[in-house]
Amino acid sequence: MSQTFKRTIENFTCGHCGVKVAGNGYTNHCPVCLWSRHVDVHPGDRAAKCRGMMGPVGLTIRARQNIITHRCIVCGYTKNNRAVRQDNDDTLIELSTKPR
């Protein structure tokens, strides 16, 4: 892990679809709709001032791992996050067919 990583365990309600999500300290997006929120400068630090919603805009496979690309709808910041097994398969498939 990076020295700038700070594990922050917290539950949240998705700002996009309203699902209640149980966080585990590594959770960074809603497993139902795959949306996220722009809260970190470095993972877990909660230092970003933007707080905008980050929509899933792409899915790539790297080293046999699904990687979701999120883009902030407020400031345009983009970030890649690993998909997890709890993520909705249908939503991942739909995302994989979206043109970038």
Image (cartoon, rainbow, N blue to C red):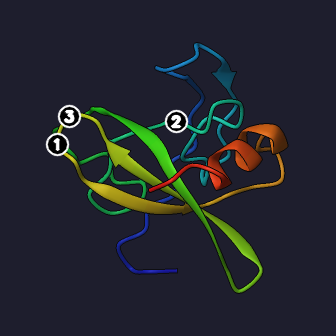
Do the residues bearing badges 2 and 1 touch, measured as CB atoms within 8 Å?
no
Q: Earlier in the sequence, mark 2 or mark 1?
A: 2
Callout 1 touching callout 3 (CB < 8 Å): yes
Q: Measure how far apart labels 2 and 3 are at the Cα level.
A: 14 Å
Q: Residue at x 54, y 47 (%)?
A: 28
Is 100 placed left or right of 38 in the picture? right
N-term mark: 2 or 3: 2
Secondary structure beneath label 3:
loop
Residue 12 position, x and y percent, is 55, 25
Q: Secondary structure at mark 2?
A: loop
The residue under the point 60% across, 54% down is 26
Q: Residue 35 shows which numbered tag?
A: 2
Check disc 3 and report the residue beneath it. Answer: 74
Question: Real-space Cα distance between discs 2 and 1?
Answer: 15 Å
Residue 34 in the image: x percent, y percent?
60, 39
Give the residue at the far top of this rendering: 18
Identify which amino acid the numbered label 1 is placed on: Cys
Mark 1–mark 3 distance (CA, rounded to whole Å): 4 Å
Task: Say which residue appears at 58% left-offset and 13% top-offset.
Answer: 18
Which residue corresponds to mark 1? 75
Foreground: 79 or 44? 79
In this picture, is 63 found above or below 18?
below
